[in-house]
Amino acid sequence: MNLNDAPYDALERIFHEPNRLAIMSALASAEQGLRFGDLKQVCNLTDGNLNRHLKALDEAKAISIWKRFVKGKPCTTVSISKIGLKRFTEYLSALEKVLESAKTAVSEETKEEGGMLGGFQNA
């Protein structure tokens, strides 16, 4: 698919949900992955909410989840998968194009309206 032809088509719903966008963004910058508790804190999510989003991302093969015991306590580590990183990078490129297009359209409309947008004065 040519991103320039249909950037909206590349906005994968799996990443477009705000909490999943936060999770994927955090994991993209964590080379060794993140422990469940750390990811929960970074994304400001509850255990149940994080679990629900991780399940969806895992089913989409966007992440990898490792469960092990450390000193008798369960330890879950989450990392972005190779395919997940590729798909997320494509998603970010598409999102960037969509946002840039919107920014340009708003800027042009603001100029045409003499500083007015939709009948409201720009702040």
Image: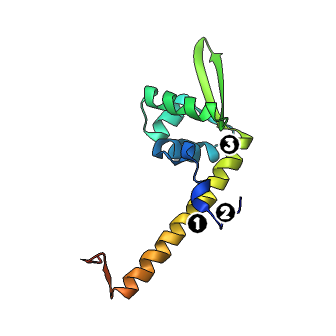
User: From the viewer's perspective, is 42 left or right of 117?
Assistant: right
Q: CA distance from mark 2 to mark 3?
A: 18 Å
Mark 1 to mark 2 CA distance (whole Å) = 8 Å
| Residue at the extreme right of the image, as rendered | 82
Quarter residue 70 falls in: top right
User: What colour-coding does the image apply?
Assistant: rainbow
The type of residue carrying mark 1 is Lys
- Secondary structure category for the residue under label 1: helix
Q: Residue at x 56, y 42 (%)?
A: 14
Q: Nearer the viewer, mark 1 or mark 2?
A: 2
Give the residue pinned by disc 3. Answer: 84
Residue visible at 43% across and 39% down in the picture? 44
Image depth: mark 2 or mark 3 in front: 2
User: Which residue does the image show at 65% across and 18% down from the upper left?
Assistant: 68
Q: What residue sits right under mark 1 in the picture? A: 97
Q: Position of residue 76 (x, y in %)?
A: 60, 24
Secondary structure of residue under mark 2: loop
Q: Amino acid at mark 2?
A: Leu
Label 3 or label 1, whichever lies nearer to me, is 1
The quarter holding residue 45 reads top left
Q: Earlier in the sequence, mark 1 or mark 2?
A: 2
For the residues bearing labels 1 and 2, Cβ distance under 8 angstroms: yes
Q: Is residue 33 above or below residue 105?
A: above
Mark 3 nearby-residue class (10 Å; few <14, some 14–19, many ≥20): many
Per the rendering, the mark at residue 14 is none
* Disc 3 secondary structure class: helix
- All told, the count of numbered labels is 3
Q: CA distance from mark 3 to mark 1?
A: 20 Å
